[in-house]
């Protein structure tokens, strides 16, 4: 995924399926300058990771 698409998903009122290495995630923040995103993995709000945006995949 590119940074612009990650920002679009993050700012959208719609829900999009996003995955990190096959696991569903929620985008919580996008750092456009560094190409990084903070994501919540699964349903636990405390389980967050900061990863390169290009590791994220938009699912069906």
Image: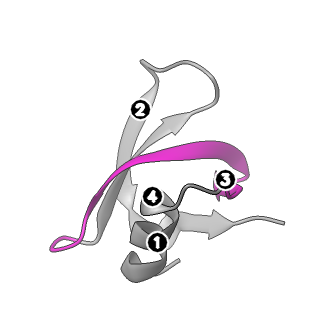
Label 3: few (<14), some (14–19) or many (≥20) C-alpha neighbours in 10 Å: few
Q: Secondary structure at mark 1?
A: helix
Tell me which numbered mark, 2 or 3, is placed earlier along the sequence: 3
29 in the magenta segment: yes
| Residue drawn 55% across the image and 18% down it | 44
The disc placed on residue 17 is: none
| Residue drawn 70% across the image and 44% down it | 23
Q: Secondary structure at mark 2?
A: strand
**Callout 4–callout 1 Cβ contact below 8 Å:** yes
Q: Which residue is mark 1?
A: 8
Q: Is residue 20 above or below residue 41?
A: below
Tell me which numbered mark, 4 or 3, is placed earlier along the sequence: 4
**Callout 2–callout 1 Cβ contact below 8 Å:** no
- Decide if residue 9 is on the left or right side of residue 15: left
Label 1: few (<14), some (14–19) or many (≥20) C-alpha neighbours in 10 Å: few
Q: CA distance from mark 3 to mark 1?
A: 11 Å
Considering the whole magenta stretch, tell me its main secondary structure: strand
Q: CA distance from mark 2 to mark 3?
A: 19 Å
Q: Secondary structure at mark 3?
A: loop
Q: Which residue is mark 2?
A: 48
Label 4 or label 2, whichever lies nearer to me, is 4
**Callout 4–callout 3 Cβ contact below 8 Å:** no
């Amino acid at each position: 995924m590119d940074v612009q698409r990650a920002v679009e998903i993050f700012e959208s009122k719609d829900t999009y399926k996003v995955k990190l290495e096959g696991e569903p995630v929620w985008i919580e923040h996008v750092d456009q300058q560094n190409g990084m995103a903070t994501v919540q993995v699964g349903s636990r709000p405390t389980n967050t990771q900061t990863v390169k945006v290009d590791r994220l995949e938009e699912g069906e």
